[in-house]
């Protein structure tokens, strides 16, 4: 079997996940326990409940990951764990358990950045499909419930960690996924809203409502903003006859209920579906155009798309189209590797293993850990 075998553990948000990955190139197992049913009742993630659920889930989920990979803990070469960013209490559960396992089994511990994990999900998927590395450097759009950021990713020598990241732009307010979840909530669709918007939008006209786009001048013009869009949707619902539909959908989704999609769709009139489609299109267009602008400006050879919102079908289509028009291919993993999982953490740990970048036993959770700093833009 290819080595090293890395056990990955991820508990940064609302998924308790464990996976075994061989040489950053093949999943032997990947188990994800979603806490969505717990948080749905509150219409969003409750940090205290997230910690409690991770505590409940972490032992059986790691055991399942080892069982499905058909290996004993003693056979893994390292334990990798998300050290940040994320919810402090949630991170702590995974980190503490990973340390205990590594210490007990005499294995090295590797602390992984959550966003590096999302980016490495793209590379893991390509290796699994025998497609090799993307051409470097790459621009990576990482877009999730907690993050919306553009990175320039360059290759380095293995001893230097294999990869170098540079921050090109990030959201100044809401993450794209967060904006989607909030818009879904205000339209009475329930939680989490992203996947529901994805499904419902296909029944609406995406050019029905034109939203103004945020514009940033100066060195950080690749930044994003989604809170204005969210407010525009709110204002639209207040100035158009949408209130009855919202009330009806709120009834359907009250107390954490999850009605079948068809029932939810039937509770949306054409105006609501148009609004949903127009919102989704505005997000997809904004993300796609800035990503391709970044690729152009920084001379990227490829574009990577990662994170939970990368599961959005309209975003995938829009980015692929905008990128193709200017000569780039977009590499995005399948949905199971887009949303939070531990295989991406085990894969991102591979270059750290090669560089001997192991964590000390006092490794702490870093809720705000940046992946990379901004550097001066290249001359135009
Ligand atoms: O990466 P992820 O699993 O967790 C974080 O690190 O945040 O991303 C979760 C986010 C949520 O906001 C969820 O609504 C969004 O990704 N999401 C989607 C879709 N699937 C998940 N948003 C739009 N379309 C989807 N298909
Ligand atoms: Zn994530």
Image (cartoon, rainbow, N blue to C red):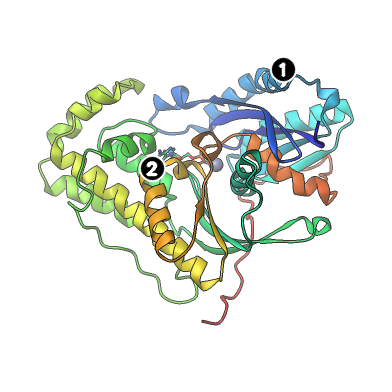
- Residue beneath label 1, please? 67
Q: Crowding at label 2, few (<14), some or many (≥20) Cα neighbours within 10 Å?
A: some
* The one of 94 and 260 positioned closer to us in this rendering: 260
Circle 2 sits in a helix, a strand or a loop, which is it?
helix
- What separation in Å lies between label 1 and label 2 (alpha carbons)? 33 Å
* The one of 313 and 184 positioned closer to us in this rendering: 313
Q: Which corner quadrant of the image does residue 276 belong to?
A: top left
Residue 149: image x %, image y %?
A: 51, 56
Q: Which corner quadrant of the image does residue 250 belong to?
A: top left
Residue at disc 1, CB closer than 8 Å to ligand 1: no
* The one of 286 and 27 positioned closer to us in this rendering: 27
Residue 247: image x %, image y %?
A: 18, 30
Whether residue 288 is situated above or below residue 146 in the rendered picture: below
Q: Is residue 30 visible?
A: yes
- Rendered-image quadrant of the N terminus: top right
Q: Which corner quadrant of the image does residue 60 belong to?
A: top right
Whether residue 379 is situated above or below residue 200 in the rendered picture: below
Q: Crowding at label 1, few (<14), some or many (≥20) Cα neighbours within 10 Å?
A: some
Q: Is residue 357 visible?
A: no
Q: For ligand 2, give the image quadrant.
A: top right
Residue name at image x 50 percent, y 45 percent? 146
Q: Residue furthest left?
A: 241
Mark sitting on residue 313: 2
Residue at disc 2, CB closer than 8 Å to ligand 1: yes
Q: Image check: 275 left or right of 303?
A: left
Whether residue 218 is situated above or below residue 144 in the rendered picture: below
Q: Image check: 242 left or right of 186?
A: left
* The one of 163 and 52 positioned closer to us in this rendering: 163
Q: Residue furthest front?
A: 130
Specify which label sits upstream in the sequence, 1 or 2: 1
Residue name at image x 25 percent, y 37 percent? 187
């Amino acid at each position: 079997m290819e080595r090293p075998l890395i056990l990955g553990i991820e508990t940064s948000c609302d998924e308790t996940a464990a996976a075994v990955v061989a040489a950053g190139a093949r999943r032997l197992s990947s188990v994800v326990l979603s806490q969505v049913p717990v948080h749905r009742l509150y219409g969003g993630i409750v940090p205290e409940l997230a910690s409690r659920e991770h505590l409940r889930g972490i032992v059986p989920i790691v055991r399942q990951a080892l069982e499905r990979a058909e290996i004993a803990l003693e056979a893994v070469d390292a334990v990798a764990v998300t050290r940040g960013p994320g919810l402090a209490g949630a991170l702590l559960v995974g980190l503490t358990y990973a340390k205990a396992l590594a210490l007990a089994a005499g294995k090295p511990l590797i602390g992984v950045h959550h966003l590096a994990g999302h980016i490495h999900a793209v590379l893991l998927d390509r290796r699994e499909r025998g497609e090799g590395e993307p051409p470097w450097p790459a621009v990576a759009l990482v877009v999730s419930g907690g993050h919306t950021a553009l990175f320039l990713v360059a290759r380095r020598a293995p001893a230097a960690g294999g990869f170098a990241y540079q921050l090109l732009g990030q959201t100044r307010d809401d993450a794209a996924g967060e904006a989607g979840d909030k818009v879904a909530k205000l339209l009475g669709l329930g939680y989490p809203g992203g996947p529901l918007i994805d499904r419902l939008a296909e029944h609406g006209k995406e050019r029905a409502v034109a939203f103004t786009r945020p514009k940033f001048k100066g060195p950080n013009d690749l930044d994003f903003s989604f809170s204005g869009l969210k407010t525009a949707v709110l204002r639209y619902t207040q100035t158009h006859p949408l209130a009855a539909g919202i009330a009806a959908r709120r009834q359907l989704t009250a107390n954490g209920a999850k009605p079948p999609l068809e029932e939810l769709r039937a509770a949306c009139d054409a105006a609501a579906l148009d609004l949903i489609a127009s919102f989704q299109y505005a997000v997809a267009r904004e993300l796609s155009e800035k990503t391709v602008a970044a690729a152009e400006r920084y001379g990227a050879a490829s574009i990577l798309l990662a994170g939970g919102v990368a599961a959005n079908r309209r975003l995938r289509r829009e980015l692929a189209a905008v990128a193709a028009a200017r000569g780039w291919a977009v590499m995005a993993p399948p949905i199971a590797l887009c949303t939070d999982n531990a295989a991406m953490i085990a894969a991102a740990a591979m270059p750290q293993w090669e560089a001997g970048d192991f964590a000390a036993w006092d490794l702490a959770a870093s809720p705000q850990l940046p992946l990379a700093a901004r550097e001066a833009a290249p001359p135009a």
